[in-house]
Image (cartoon, rainbow, N blue to C red):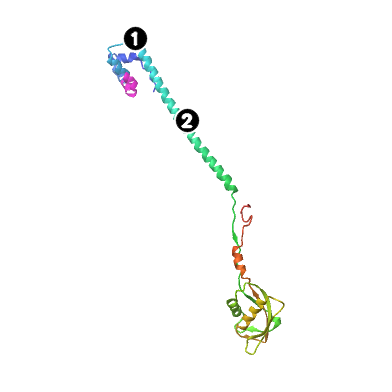
Amino acid sequence: MENNYQLSRIHNYIHGLMSREEMFQLEKEALEDPFLQDAIDGYRLQNGVDAKQLSLLQQRLSRRIENTIATRHAQYFTWQRLAIGAAAGVLFVVLLALLYFKHFNGKAERTTDVTLSEPENLVAIEPLLDGGDAAPVGGWKAFEQYLNNQVRDGGKGGEIIVNFTIGKDGLPDQIHAEGTPEQALVDEAIRLLQSGGKWQGTKGRLKITFPLKEMKNSAQSNIIKPPHCFGIEKK
């Protein structure tokens, strides 16, 4: 708080020329302002000063008070400006970070690996009724299961149509293939029919499909990345 100290008040206070209320007011001001208390103590130590000395002392006190107030204001505004500048800098960095992530995440490529399902690697049979009436004694389902359990992993797949007759012992006989299939398929079909149990009927005609064994490994390694599927961005 800025006070206009008058040395005449100090003089009157020291010499008891003030009323009780005025002395109380000056003492209260001295408690709040150490410069006023210093002036009172300094004046009390002197026996007396002339008017010129009082004027000089008053000027010095006034300049000292003005300098103190100016220093306080300068420090206050300096810290205030520093705080505002720091807050603005933090907001600027946060804004740049948000723009960076928004820009690069929007262009980030998203791909999905799609693995082809593995086909059923089984032997399939199809009886051709126009070629005869033969049928396995245990039924077609059991015979097909037997083929899948006993087929040899030759690696070559394909279809083959075989004709055969049923001997007196109930086993396939005179087995031969139609067309010119792979000899390995013909040999495997003959082996499976001769060791596959008894049949009923007189003759039969059967189409056997052998799977390609390499399909299993190739299907596992065949992974595709679609350019655009269900929201997946194109590269």
Percent x, y for residue 88? 50, 35
Q: How many marks?
A: 2
Relative side of 181 to 45, left or right: right
Q: Name which residue type carries label 2.
A: Arg
Q: Residue at x 42, y 22 (%)?
A: 70
Residue at image mark 1: 51
The image quarter in which residue 77 lies: top left
Residue sticking out furthest to the front:
183
Q: Could you say which is closer to the camera, residue 160 or residue 230?
A: 160
Q: Could you say which is closer to the camera, residue 150 or residue 184?
A: 184
The image quarter in which residue 64 lies: top left
Q: Which mark is residue 81?
A: 2
Q: Which mark is residue 107?
A: none
Q: Which residues are magenta?
A: 27-38
Q: Name which residue type carries label 1.
A: Ala
Q: Which of marks 1 and 2 precedes in the sequence? A: 1
Q: Is residue 199 above or below residue 159?
A: below
Is residue 178 one of those drawn in magenta?
A: no
